[in-house]
Image (cartoon, helix red, strand yellow):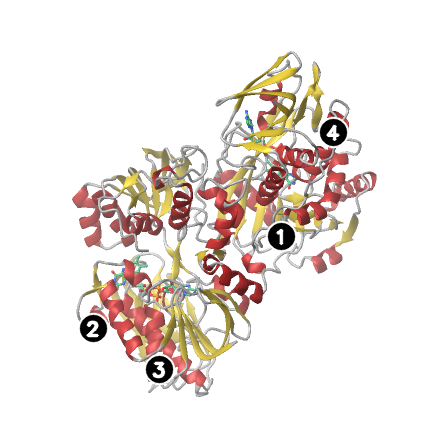
């Protein structure tokens, strides 16, 4: 029997799992995909918002601001790239200055440091800003993060501290048997005292296993461009357009890997529609080009889409089911969900779990994840030391992003193992570069097949069914490469 | 730290030729750095005939052609490192590289970059729709089949009808796949007629001109391609769509010079997407030379070899301090010319100049006109010009020295 079952391994589920792992509890996290953080937590803007934008008094505002403050420590403990580069919201029309001033007031109410800057001041910070910029709001506490490894490392650390993870398992029903819940998946069923519903855009479905619910989750898509690394000084902050009633508006930002990301759009969609379309992306291009000059869209290496789980209530829904305080919904976690996630986890534990379950701290809890290898960031001596111990660190398998075989093997020898080409890509960046794995995919596929002792036919690119190889060729190649 | 007079990055045909020439010109201290396990570059993968007609007057396979140059490099005892990747290349020519013996830093007085090109992929062409598995560049699929022995396709649509796309169509068919179509966005194929016949017609593979992929459909593996017809401005025409139920889309949509390793050096980039170079293949960064597919993509290896020789020659002059800049001429591609190499002329001592370029669109019955500040210095009549064929025009300046300013290349259609 489990004390707690968490449904969903997005950032919300894994943050809660990790915070729970400091207590003496049996915790199981069930995730339907073959990796954690493989749905919304993977496809977003990856901004650690300062919190100037949510309406004061909402959970969004409160948890955003509290969450933001935690990231320096969390990223140190979890070995995740994070940079507080600051955000600038720009106003391109004299008539809209009042909106920017209203945002400044919201920032003060939310206790977020924010400064109104003149055109001259803005251009000093960002020489490539559009000539039409009139005024801007600068928030120094905003930052950028690597969202992939935030999820993976967070789960890894939770597992190091005893949380169990079941991937490839979908929760298909939940019922209450006396004191306990019975959580039924497509593979098994489990008993537990407390269920935490962190199922992202499926949270409404999971919640309604227990009772009739009075909120809806409306999926809304955001499409993006990713550009290659080029000039590091092209842009220094996250630049937003003024928010509209549809969302935070289009932004342009660096990523922690020194790529550039431009988006998102905002349109109602179906729950599993991750397609990109030209009209939408063209409109993103136009909005972005209005605020920033000379964006080299010809450096695009990828377009992608993410889906916001917009709640009909317009605020995060973090509360027990009306009929059962042991069933906790963490639903409607749209933006700023990523930045709020540590504070959401605290809120869930302090306000909703601790009143109903005895929480005793473990003695041997270790908040620091076992260090990952970032070969490129090591000093020359450290690099050579490592190669002396293990020649795999001298073999570059991805030339665009300079990833070594040693790093790929390191992430394979972990609790949260990458099972697919994409999972390797998210963790190590192999295949994330300009050639988009044209050169290295075949080698990564072999590494996976060898590691798991399976036929290459079984290796997936990403989701189930995304196999790459159909058969062996007649003469089965020249295996000497 | 290691010190070298000349470091050549990339041991393909350009790099090998450059090394050989530089040695002939008296440069002793040369190092070739190659990331693969073998010298020769892309040639090693081109097992068909058709290499060397220009230089050897005979038809060799890619590996045979490469072998001749590898032999010379070995005979001349030019030093090279295999399985060695560059980690960074910084201002002042500090090269950090990695191989089994560890990470080393080498300082070079002069560098020739000869790193070749890479294939454009789905991201680069903004392919719209879903992002399932089953979308490969032709080269990636080729690696799966030729080297790994894995077959990644059953029902295939190929995007791009250049020679690589056409040859891939035949290869896929011979391996047992069903090639449903080759789509080409332009109203003409960029491949040789011979290849259209031998690779498509002989296997009844239809070629759809003025068609491209409008939408990719498939949640996990590719399920369907919606192809759309485009007008002369390459915009989709409403209602002109064809659906293909296929599991694989192979992209053969062009090659691009692979120059990101030069990012920290402040090079200027030409419209061919490679570094701008002068007539001896020197970039705007003094002492940094470049040659081969990393400057502009070539159809024939013989031209690559010659370009490598030129860069090797230039680098030797640079190292011997024999370069005297006395001209300042920008070379400009105009109207239907998509790019030209070189981009600068700097030395009046070079009497023999060669301009290499491509046209943007096919054209017939034209004059290629080369002018120096509006004075015509060469005019060549051509029956037809194709974007898939690199043109080269030589001029000799002995009798009419060039003047500072501009050299322009124009294409004019005859009435
Ligand atoms: C376009 C866009 C931009 C954004 N930008 C930002 C930003 O810049 N900053 C920021 O802070 N936030 C941002 N967000 C918001 C942020 O991405 C989300 O709030 C956050 O990722 C939500 O995490 P989650 O864990 O709730 O959901 P998810 O990541 O979707 O996780 C839910 C998980 O539950 C699993 N699941 C679902 N059903 C079941 C089942 N039946 N059984 C088992 N498992 C199940 C899913 O597979 C999934 O892994 C953005 C969102 C979008 C869409
Ligand atoms: C698919 C294809 C088919 C062709 N078919 C024909 C034909 O039939 N007949 C013909 O005459 N010509 C043909 N060509 C043209 C010609 O063969 C090539 O253009 C020529 O070989 C390119 O030589 P290169 O040295 O510029 O590039 P490459 O041969 O690509 O060599 C570049 C080398 O640099 C290395 N390298 C790259 N980056 C680094 C780095 N950072 N560190 C170390 N090493 C690095 C690479 O591993 C590679 O070995 C073909 C070309 C292609 C692409």
Q: Which residue is identified by label 2?
A: B56
Secondary element under disc 2, as helix, strand or loop, is helix
Whichever of callouts 4 and 1 sits on the residue coming sooner in the sequence is: 1
Residue at image x 34%, y 70%? B14
Judged by depth in the image, the label closer to the viewer, 1 or 2, is: 2
Q: Is mark 2 within 8 Å of ligand 2?
A: no
Mark 4 vs 1: CB contact within 8 A: no
Distance CA(mark 3)–CA(mark 2):
21 Å
Taking the view exactly as shown, the residue that stands out farthest to the top is A178
Residue shown at 71%/21% (left/top)? A320
Disc 1 versus disc 2: distance between alpha carbons? 53 Å
Disc 4: which residue: A359
Q: Secondary structure at mark 1?
A: loop
Q: Is residue B231 shown to the viewer in this render?
A: no
Write down the chain letter for disc 1.
Answer: A
Circle 3 marks a residue in which chain?
Answer: B
Numbered circle sitting on residue A292? 1
């Amino acid at each position: 029997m489990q004390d707690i079952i968490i449904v969903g391994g997005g950032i919300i589920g894994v943050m809660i799992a990790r915070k729970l792992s400091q207590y003496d509890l049996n915790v199981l996290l069930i995730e339907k995909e073959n990796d954690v953080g493989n749905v919304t937590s993977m496809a977003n803007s990856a901004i650690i918002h300062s919190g100037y934008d949510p309406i004061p008094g909402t959970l969004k505002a409160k948890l955003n601001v509290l969450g933001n403050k935690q990231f320096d420590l969390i990223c140190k403990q979890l070995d995740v790239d994070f940079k507080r580069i600051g955000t600038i919201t720009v106003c391109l029309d004299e008539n809209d200055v009042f909106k920017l001033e209203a945002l400044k007031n919201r920032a003060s109410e939310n206790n977020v440091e924010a400064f109104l800057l003149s055109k001259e001041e803005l251009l000093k910070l960002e020489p490539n800003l559009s000539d039409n910029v009139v005024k801007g709001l600068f928030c120094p506490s905003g930052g950028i993060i690597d969202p992939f490894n935030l999820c993976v490392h967070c789960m890894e650390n939770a597992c190091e501290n005893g949380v169990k993870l079941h991937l490839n398992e979908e929760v298909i029903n939940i019922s209450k048997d006396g004191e306990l819940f019975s959580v039924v998946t497509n593979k098994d069923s489990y008993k537990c005292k407390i269920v935490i519903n962190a199922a992202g855009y499926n949270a409404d479905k999971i919640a309604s296993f227990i009772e009739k619910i009075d909120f809806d989750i409306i999926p809304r898509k955001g499409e993006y461009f990713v550009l290659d690394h080029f000039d590091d000084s092209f842009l220094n902050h996250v630049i937003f357009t003024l928010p509209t009633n549809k969302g935070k508006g289009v932004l342009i930002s660096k990523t922690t890997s020194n790529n550039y990301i431009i988006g998102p759009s905002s349109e109602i969609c179906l729950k599993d529609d991750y397609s990109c379309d030209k009209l939408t992306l063209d409109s993103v291009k136009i909005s972005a080009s209005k605020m920033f000059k000379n964006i080299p869209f010809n450096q695009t290496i990828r377009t992608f889409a993410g889906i916001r789980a917009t709640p009909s209530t317009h605020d995060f829904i973090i509360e027990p089911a009306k009929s059962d305080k042991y069933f906790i919904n963490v639903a409607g976690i749209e933006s700023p969900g990523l930045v709020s996630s540590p504070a959401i986890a605290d809120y869930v534990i302090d306000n909703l779990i601790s009143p109903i379950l005895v929480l005793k701290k473990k003695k041997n809890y270790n908040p620091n994840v076992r260090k990952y290898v970032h070969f490129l960031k090591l000093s020359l001596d450290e690099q050579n030391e490592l190669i002396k111990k293990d020649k795999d660190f001298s073999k570059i398998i991805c030339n665009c992003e300079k990833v070594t075989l040693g790093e790929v093997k390191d992430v394979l020898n972990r609790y949260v193992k990458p099972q697919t080409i994409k999972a390797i890509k998210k963790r190590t960046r192999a295949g994330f570069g300009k050639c988009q794995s044209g050169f290295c995919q075949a080698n990564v596929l072999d590494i996976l097949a060898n590691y798991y002792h399976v036929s290459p036919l079984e290796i997936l690119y990403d989701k189930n069914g995304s196999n790459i190889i159909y058969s062996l060729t007649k003469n089965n190649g020249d295996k000497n490469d | 730290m290691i010190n070298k007079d000349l470091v050549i990055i990339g041991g393909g045909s350009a790099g090998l030729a450059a090394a050989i020439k530089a040695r002939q010109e008296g440069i002793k201290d040369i190092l070739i750095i190659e990331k693969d396990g073998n010298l020769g570059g892309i040639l090693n993968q081109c097992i068909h005939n058709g290499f060397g007609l220009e230089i050897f007057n005979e038809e060799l396979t890619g590996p045979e052609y490469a072998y001749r140059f590898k032999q010379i490099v070995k005979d001349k005892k030019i030093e090279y490192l295999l399985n060695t990747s560059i980690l960074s290349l910084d201002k002042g020519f500090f090269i950090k590289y990695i191989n089994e013996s560890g990470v080393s830093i080498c300082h070079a007085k002069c560098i020739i970059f000869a790193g070749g090109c890479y294939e454009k992929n789905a991201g680069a062409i903004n392919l719209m729709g879903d992002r399932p598995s089953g979308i490969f560049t032709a080269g990636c699929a080729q690696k799966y089949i030729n080297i790994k022995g894995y077959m990644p396709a059953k029902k295939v649509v190929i995007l791009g009808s250049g020679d690589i796309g056409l040859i891939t169509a035949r290869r896929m068919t011979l391996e047992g796949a069903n090639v449903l179509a080759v789509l080409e966005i332009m109203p003409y194929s960029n491949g040789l007629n011979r290849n259209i016949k031998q690779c498509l017609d002989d296997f009844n593979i239809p070629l759809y001109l003025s068609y491209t992929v409008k939408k990719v459909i498939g949640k996990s593996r590719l399920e369907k391609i919606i192809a759309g017809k485009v007008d002369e401005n390459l915009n989709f025409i409403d209602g002109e769509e064809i659906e293909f139920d296929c599991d694989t889309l192979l992209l053969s949509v062009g090659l691009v010079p692979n120059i990101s390793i030069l990012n920290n050096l402040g090079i200027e980039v030409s419209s061919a997407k490679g570094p701008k170079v002068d007539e001896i293949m020197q970039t705007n960064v003094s002492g940094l030379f470049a040659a081969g597919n990393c400057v502009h993509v070539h159809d024939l290896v013989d031209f690559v070899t010659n370009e490598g020789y030129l860069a090797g020659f230039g680098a030797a002059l640079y190292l011997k301090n024999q370069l005297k800049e006395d001209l300042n001429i920008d070379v400009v591609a105009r109207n239907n010319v998509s790019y030209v190499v070189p981009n600068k002329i700097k030395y009046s001592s070079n009497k023999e100049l060669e301009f290499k370029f491509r046209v943007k669109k096919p054209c017939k019955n034209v004059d290629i006109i080369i002018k120096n500040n509006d004075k015509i210095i060469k005019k060549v009549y051509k029956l037809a010009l194709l974007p898939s064929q690199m043109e080269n025009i030589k001029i000799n300046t002995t009798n009419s020295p060039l003047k500072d300013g501009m050299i322009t290349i124009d294409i004019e259609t005859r009435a």
